[in-house]
Image (cartoon, rainbow, N blue to C red):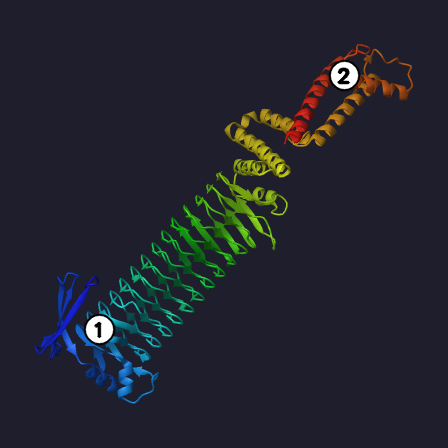
Amino acid sequence: MVTNFFSYKVKIRSNQFVTEDGRVFENTASISFFDENKKELAFRELGYVDTEDIFKLIDNNEEINLNHCYVENFMLSAYRKSRNLEKDSIVKINNLQAEHSIFESQLLNDFSFAHFGENRMSFKHSQFINGAVDFSNCDFGDSEADFSYCFFNNGNVDFKNSTFGVGEVTYKNSVFGLGVKDFQYVDFGEGELIFVNTEFGDGDISFINTNFNKGNVSFKIARFGNGKIDFHFAKFGSGDISFERTEFQNGKVDFRKVEFGKGKINFNRAVFGSGEVSFEGSSLSKGKMSFKKTEFGAGFKGFDLLEFEESDLIFEGIDFGVGNVSFNNSKLHTLLLNSCHLDNYFDFRLAQCSYLDLSDTIVRDIIDFLPYDFDVKIKHINISGMRLLGRIDIDWFKNIVYDTISTLSHTTLRDKAEQFRILKENFGGIGQYYQEDLAYIEFKRFEQKAELEEALKSNKAKAFIHYPIYGFKWLMFDKVGLYATSPARVLTSLFTTFFIFSLIHLILPRFVETSISCIPADLSFFDNVLATFYYSAITFLTVGYGDCCPVGILRLVASFEGFFGVFMMSYFTVAFARKILR
């Protein structure tokens, strides 16, 4: 089949033409195809059929076999006019076969308002070398409809408002020229629909309000040209949908308000051009839509207002190109973008999502979680392994950050620590220091838990060492001062420690033979308390006036108190300076 010819010439000769199956035609059509230099590219001979002879077969409800035929100016509008029928009256065509045929019309190849019965209808390997093609408002019955390997030289092809039944419908390996391809309001029935390796050519393509019903739908390796590709309001059923390795070029790709049914939707390895891509308001019921290793161009990618409450949307290993990407106000069960490049603004202000996976992503711009005019409800977020070169707009309280990260069951303690570390650096970089401290605290807590867990896994026999070390860190670093993020907490701990040591100095001489040199035994209780707290203060603060010294076991207590005094004052200095310097 020649699809790249520049011109052609048809000559009708009076020689008989005999087909491979023995059918005899009185005349032969000789068709030559030429390139732009008038060099012959191909030559074909076919049986010549007069349209009036086809009309008589329609009148008699006979089968129509046009295999290996040349048909000129076939128009059902002309048939209706010659039979005094209404312009939109249904014409019944019985078992039409037109394989390896050529159709030519100066105006229109018109099959509109035809009813093709229940037998297989086929245009396989046929060529429409001139004129637009009109199959609008046709009823193809429950038989198979075969348009595979067809060539529509004039790309203006109209199937709108047509109906198919339970049989397979295929446009496999067909080629469309420049023009508008219209499949609006088509009902493709319940059979399988195949557009595999179809070349749609340049021009707008419309599947608006098309009903794809229950069968599987495949646009695998199809190639759309430049022009708008519109699936607006289309409805799919329970079958699987494949756009694997499909090329969309530079026109707008519109899947707004599409009902994707219950099947699996596959855009893996598809290629989008620089036009806008929109799935706004589309819905999917208990299914999965995947974009694995898909290539996006420079246009805006809109996934706003999705209704995927029980469905998964998967992006894996994708570079989203230049345009911004939005999932604003969408409802999804799972949104996965692991190992993707997020080089532009991403709107993750989701109305509902059980799990958002941003693990191993590279972020070079802003990813936005901040609630604006509705609550952002993301139950779990995973940002482990993220390389953050841009920033995350997120609020620790409004986005309930701690719960979204810490309660995710399938991430390790080390993963959780890593995620809080990323958030700590993010908050610090944008000047949100209070939230930076909150993230840092959780980072250190999960880091310590991870270290304990890893130590126990490597050598359980040393648990008696690991647990005390963990307990000491938990008490001194976490509870005493929140890892130097809270001067007030450190100051409170400082006074608590001082008070405890003071009580020890006050109570211990009553049970053990020990004393403080500057405190006589006959002092009243109140004076004893004041003197003891004075002695504890100069010991705790390491002042050392020399007027008081411990005797007996209180020397050991004094040594510990002096150490803790220096430690707590240093701890407070660090925490206070950290707050002030920021």
141 and 545: which is toward the camera: 545
Q: Is residue 537 above or below residue 317?
A: above
Of 418 and 50, the residue lying toward us: 50
- Labelled disc at residue 539: 2
Q: For this view, does 428 lie left or right of residue 308?
A: right
The residue that disc 1 covers is 103
Residue found 41% across the figure and 46% down from its top? 319
Dot 1: within a 10 Å radius of its alpha carbon, few (fewer than 14), some, or many (20 or more) residues?
many
Q: Quadrant of residue 503?
A: top right
Percent of width and height locating residue 485: 65, 32
Residue 477: percent from the left, percent from the top?
Answer: 64, 28
Residue situated furthest bottom in the rendering? 84
Q: Amino acid at mark 1?
A: Phe
Q: Secondary structure at mark 2?
A: helix
Left or right of residue 263, residue 410 in this image: right
Kind of residue at disc 2: Thr
